[in-house]
Image (spheres, grey):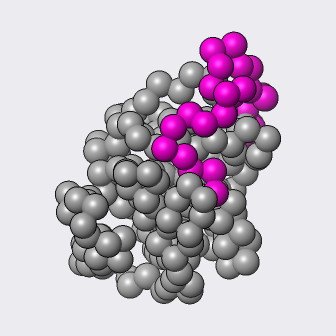
């Protein structure tokens, strides 16, 4: 499975957080993904350097609160302004320009998400990804949900919507945040 070159470049900026056996996974200091009862609950954590990636079937989820342009996150800058700074940085370093297929803004109960579904190229290989700048409570996080190029746009649209609906600004699920919670067996990539 391809990984976004940008995500690898950001690997040293990602904060590794200990993943206790909880279905509300802490993605960053300020943001949780409460996924109990969803396929993401059994995703495999892939730790590397100071960062982590979640793997589920053919999907790869990278995330960070320290993406290029995050420093203008002062709650006065809009998601669109922050994303424009990020997109300009990426475009300057891209092999080929991204082909944006869908650009929208999702307003969910616990998050507001500026989302771009796009085709990108890494090391000559095309792939599909959802790049999502998310406001969750007072914090912002960038998520990249990557899928094989043959994935349909409709599949990635649904998967990315389902994913961002899980974002919270705290460990909101009392069952999965309990110290004695036992999650299901992690999905195998073998």
Position of 120 compared to 33: left or right? left
Q: Residue furthest left?
A: 71
**Depth check, front residue: 24 or 121:** 24
Part of the protein shown in magenta: 165-190
Compare residues 13 and 162 and report the one nearer the observer. 162
Q: Main secondary structure of the magenta part?
A: loop
Relative to 79, say whether 53 is above or below: above
Q: Residue at x 53, y 27 (%)?
A: 19
Tell me if residue 183 is in the magenta stretch.
yes
Is 36 placed above or below 135 here? above
Residue 176 sits inside the magenta stretch: yes
In the image, 142 versus 32, the foreground residue is 32
Query: Could you tell me residue 138's position as x and y percent?
Result: 37, 51
Residue 181: % across, % down: 71, 19
Looking at the image, residue 122 lies above or below residue 52: below
The residue at the point 56 percent across, 86 percent down is: 101
Image-quadrant location for residue 51: top left
Residue 24 location in percent, x, y? Answer: 61, 35
Instruction: Left or right? Give the position of 155 relative to 15.
Output: right
User: Which residue is pictured at 67% across the width and 70% down the height?
Assistant: 156
In the depicted structure, whether residue 27 falls above or below residue 101 = above
In the picture, the quarter occupied by the N terminus is: bottom right
On the rendered structure, is 3 left or right of 128? left
Can residue 135 be seen from the camera position used here?
A: yes
**Residue 44 visible to an observer of this rendering:** no
């Amino acid at each position: 499975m391809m990984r976004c070159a940008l995500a690898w470049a950001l690997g040293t900026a990602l904060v590794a957080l200990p993943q206790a056996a909880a279905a509300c996974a802490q993605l960053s200091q300020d943001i949780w993904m409460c996924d109990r009862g969803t396929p993401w609950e059994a995703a495999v954590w892939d730790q590397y350097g100071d960062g982590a990636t979640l793997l589920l079937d053919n999907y790869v989820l990278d995330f960070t609160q320290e993406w290029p342009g995050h420093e203008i996150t002062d709650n006065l800058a809009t998601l669109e302004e922050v994303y424009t700074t990020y997109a300009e940085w990426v475009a300057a370093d891209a092999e080929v320009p991204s082909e944006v297929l869908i650009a929208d803004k999702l307003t969910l109960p616990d998050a507001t998400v500026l989302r771009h579904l796009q085709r990108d190229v890494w090391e000559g290989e095309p792939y599909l990804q959802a790049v999502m700048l998310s406001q969750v409570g007072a914090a912002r996080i960038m998520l990249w949900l990557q899928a094989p190029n043959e994935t349909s746009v409709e599949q990635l649209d649904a998967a990315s919507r389902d994913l961002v609906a899980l974002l919270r600004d705290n460990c909101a699920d009392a069952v999965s945040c309990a110290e004695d919670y036992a999650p299901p067996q992690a999905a195998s990539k073998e």
